Image (cartoon, rainbow, N blue to C red):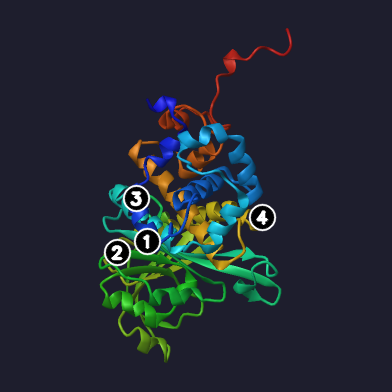
Amino acid sequence: MNSRRFVFSQLMDFLPRHEFHKCVRRYKGNYKVRKFSCTDQFLSMTFAQLTCRESLRDIETCLRAMRPKLYRAGFRSAISRSTLADANENRDWRIYADFAHGLIRTATELYAQDNFGAELKQVAYVLDSTTIDLCLSLFPWAKFRKRKAAVKLHTLMNLRGCIPCFINITDAKTHDVKVLDILVLEPGAFYIMDRAYTDFGRLYTFTESLSFFVIRAKKNLDYGRRAYRQVDKSTGLRSDQTIVLRGPKTSKMYPVPLRRVSYYDAKTKKRFVFLTNNFSLPPLTVAQLYKCRWQVELFFKWIKQHLHIKAFYGTSENAVKTQIWIAISAYVLVAIIKKELGIERSLNEILQILSITLFEKVLISQVVTETTLQNAKSDFRKQLPLFDL
């Protein structure tokens, strides 16, 4: 029965093992390996991500303390920090990158019909990046500034389920807009971006590919108004215009009309101006789409909480990329479980609960759904009085 198995082993049951072994064979991950296999490496690193271990010694100490339970949890070798460090250093990080992409495809199919806060039938993606700071003396290969090192995660997230479907890890000097050159555009899909991706030559490829974009406009945009439409200002909308670019360069880079939507947010008391190449959506939906950008920020927050400088388990480029891709695999795996088991909690809440229950013998659906959060309403009628009145 599942109730007699550890939560960790139940969690790993959702992994497509055959796909994992295909990735291992593709890059010869287990070539001349006698004991500590790629499976053991993946399980160890996933445990470290889910329980927020701080170092290799921390991983070793915690897993060795649970040695009688490890075999039932799927481990087949003893855990040593030196062995794990060598594996992270030498085994090709592409094993775990390919496996993560397989999990992403599975999760994308599961969340294909989900709503995400905007009335839209088409697929919507958010494109953004985040910088992960590193110590220059430990990571000299990732030099960013004179006294600083860093890597940059360029992420394309599907808003249906908040699943990262494209991730590119580069040095921190790489400008955000360059990722548009390698992005495979999907016809009919919407791409939401911040002002950092303003490059009208590259944005014109969206129109040529029959894809749509929503991007925040810069303040110094040089344009001419061709037409305007009436808007309901009680919703926060201020204008809905058809414009053409008038700059000597931008008019050639993007020679066709654009749509300009202005919106005032009463909560933050800020005015936002959006540009899009879609003329059929209601103007309020355009503003709602851009508001959904905060979903990718939650993903970046989780990544940075688990990949803080103290939590990197290796200093080489291969070790850092291995850890990042396994962290992404753990995140997507939890998203798959959330959908498969019909769990109503957020991904962050599920991850917090799993971090302290991995080696409990209880149904995973039970431990996730029955845990009471601190801010949940409690029955104060059962509390004893402090004073007798």
Tag 3: amino acid = Ala
Counting residues from the start of the chain, the first of labels 1 and 2 encountered is 1
Residue underneath mark 4: 310
Q: Residue furthest top?
A: 389
Counting residues from the start of the chain, the first of labels 1 and 4 encountered is 1
* Residue toward you, 219 or 250: 250
Quadrant assignment, res 275: bottom left
Query: Which image quarter is the C terminus in?
Result: top right
Residue plotted at (57% across, 45% down): 79
Residue 344 placed where, x, y %?
A: 40, 36
Counting residues from the start of the chain, the first of labels 3 and 1 encountered is 3
Q: Residue 107: which disc?
A: 3
Residue 61 visible to an observer of this rendering:
yes
Tag 4: amino acid = Lys
Residue underneath mark 1: 125
Q: Describe the element under mark 4 as helix, strand or loop.
A: helix
